[in-house]
Image: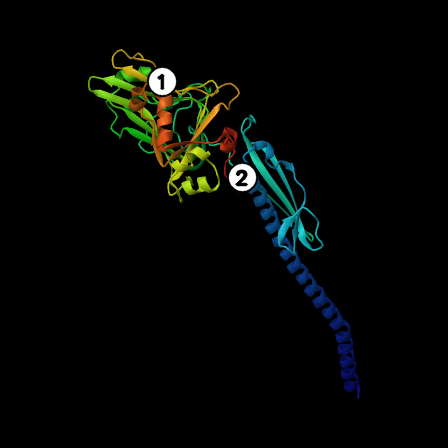
């Protein structure tokens, strides 16, 4: 009897333990399930917040890059954006059903210790439920032609060293000597008897912006000249701040030192189709008949703020300008100091042709306009230097 009583007590104890433990297990399982659901919900909200933050930053970046007038670009703390679940689009008006909010700020930050170089930052903060994500889009610092890995010229002397192949960049490149006034020119070795490469070099970028004048060849270097030379600029938009090309008459012939403009190809062909120029009315009415719809056009600008565009004739051994240099007449008072032209596919400034014309450079430009090789850009459709310099790529900062 005693054994049975003990077994009964054990059974009753086990039953009581089950009655106590099972509810605890059930509670634990419920809490675990709720926690898991909460974690899943939190993970979903976190991903949605990341999506909204990136989408908001991208939307502002596109608006910033596509606005030509710097004063009209989005800047500072912008209005809160709501992602409307009904339209699946951003809106600044608070809808009845929305996924979350996005607050975007555009600002400039110093990229160098001296704070001379600035970068633009697009910072986007998104909130979905309890989740918050912050992302940053940052522009690269300005890319200068003398910087690594380009090394197109020496910044102190402005000399192009004469490398057979130069690194290309699908981004705007600024050409500026250290003091801003020293011209960028061919190195003396490139036009001398020891030069073994072709009589041309190519700089290639999406846009090339000269902040210093381009003087293709310097007079003192012509003493050792052995041949002519072309500097080929492959870019969709080229901005000159002073340009000087030259012709040298020798007993062996005439040598030219000039510039060729050419549209670049990266992963795609750059430039505007002629049909696009016509459809968007980007040319003057009188020039519409000169446009070739299937051809591609680049843009070249001449800034006449204290700088000139000219061709200088020299004679060997004297090395003085023979005859008068021929310049493009700058804009008149009250006019835009910049002249702009669309160039078709490829265009070379020909010093011989310019100097052979009675009215020189002006007549040469008019002749090329009549041929449809150059097309004047209406002032309202010109791109400013500031706009070109701001066309820097963005990257996602960590």
Residue beneath the point at 50% across and 33% down: 381
Circle 2 packing at 10 Å, graded few (<14), some (14-19), many (20+), is few
Pointer 1 local density, CA inside 10 Å: few below 14, some 14–19, many at least 20 = many
CA separation, marks 2 and 1? 38 Å
Identify which residue, 236 or 363, lies in the foreground.
Answer: 363
Q: Residue furthest bottom?
A: 1
Of labels 2 and 1, earlier in sequence is 2
User: Whole-percent x and y of residue 161?
Assistant: 34, 26
- Among the 4 quarters of the image, the one containing residue 210: top left
In the rendering, at what x and y percent does residue 87 appear?
Answer: 63, 55
According to the picture, the residue beneath numbered tag 2 turns out to be: 66
Task: Tell me whether the residue at label 2 lies in contact with that at label 1, contact meaning CB atoms closer than 8 angstroms.
Answer: no
Q: Locate residue 64 relative to residue 167 in the image: left or right.
A: right
Provide the residue designation for mark 1: 326
Residue in front for this viewpoint, 117 or 59:
59
Q: Secondary structure at mark 2?
A: helix
Q: Position of residue 294 (x, y in %)?
A: 37, 43
In the rendered image, the quadrant that contains the N terminus is bottom right
Residue 375 quadrant = top left
Q: State left or right for residue 126 relative to residue 297.
A: right
Secondary element under disc 1, as helix, strand or loop, is strand
Residue at (66% x, 62% y) in the render: 36
Query: Is residue 137 visible in the rendered structure shown here?
Result: yes
């Amino acid at each position: 009897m005693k054994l049975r009583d003990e077994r009964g007590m054990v059974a009753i104890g086990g039953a009581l333990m089950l009655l106590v433990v099972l509810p605890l297990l059930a509670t634990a399982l419920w809490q675990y399930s709720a926690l898991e659901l909460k974690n899943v919900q939190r993970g979903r909200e976190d991903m949605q917040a990341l999506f909204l933050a990136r989408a908001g930053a991208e939307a502002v970046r596109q608006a910033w890059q596509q606005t030509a007038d710097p004063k009209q670009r989005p800047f500072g703390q912008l209005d809160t954006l709501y992602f409307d679940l009904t339209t699946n689009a951003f809106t600044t008006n608070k809808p009845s059903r929305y996924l979350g909010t996005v607050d975007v700020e555009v600002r400039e930050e110093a990229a160098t210790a001296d704070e001379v170089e600035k970068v633009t930052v697009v910072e986007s903060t998104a909130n979905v439920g309890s989740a918050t994500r912050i992302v940053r889009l940052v522009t690269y610092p300005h890319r200068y032609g003398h910087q690594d890995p380009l090394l197109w010229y020496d910044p102190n002397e402005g000399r192009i060293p004469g490398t057979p192949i130069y690194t290309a960049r699908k981004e705007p490149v600024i050409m500026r000597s250290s003091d801003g006034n020293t011209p960028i020119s061919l190195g003396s070795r490139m036009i001398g008897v020891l030069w073994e490469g072709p009589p041309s070099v190519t700089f290639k970028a999406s846009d090339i912006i000269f902040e210093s004048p381009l003087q293709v060849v310097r007079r003192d270097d012509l003493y050792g000249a052995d041949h002519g030379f072309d500097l080929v600029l492959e870019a969709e938009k080229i901005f000159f701040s002073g340009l000087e090309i030259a012709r040298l008459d020798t007993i062996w012939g005439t040598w030219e030192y000039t510039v060729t403009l050419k549209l670049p190809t990266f992963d795609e062909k750059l430039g505007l189709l002629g049909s696009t120029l016509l459809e968007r009315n980007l040319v003057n009415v009188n020039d519409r008949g000169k446009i070739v719809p299937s051809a591609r056009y680049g843009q070249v600008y001449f800034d006449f703020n204290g700088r000139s565009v000219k061709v200088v004739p020299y004679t060997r051994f004297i090395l003085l300008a023979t005859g008068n240099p021929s310049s493009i007449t700058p804009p008149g008072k009250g006019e835009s100091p910049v002249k702009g032209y669309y160039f078709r596919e490829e265009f070379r400034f020909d010093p011989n042709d310019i100097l052979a014309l009675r009215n020189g450079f002006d007549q040469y430009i008019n002749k090329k306009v009549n041929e449809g090789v150059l097309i004047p850009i209406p002032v309202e459709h010109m791109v400013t230097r500031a706009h070109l310099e701001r066309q820097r790529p963005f990257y996602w900062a960590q």
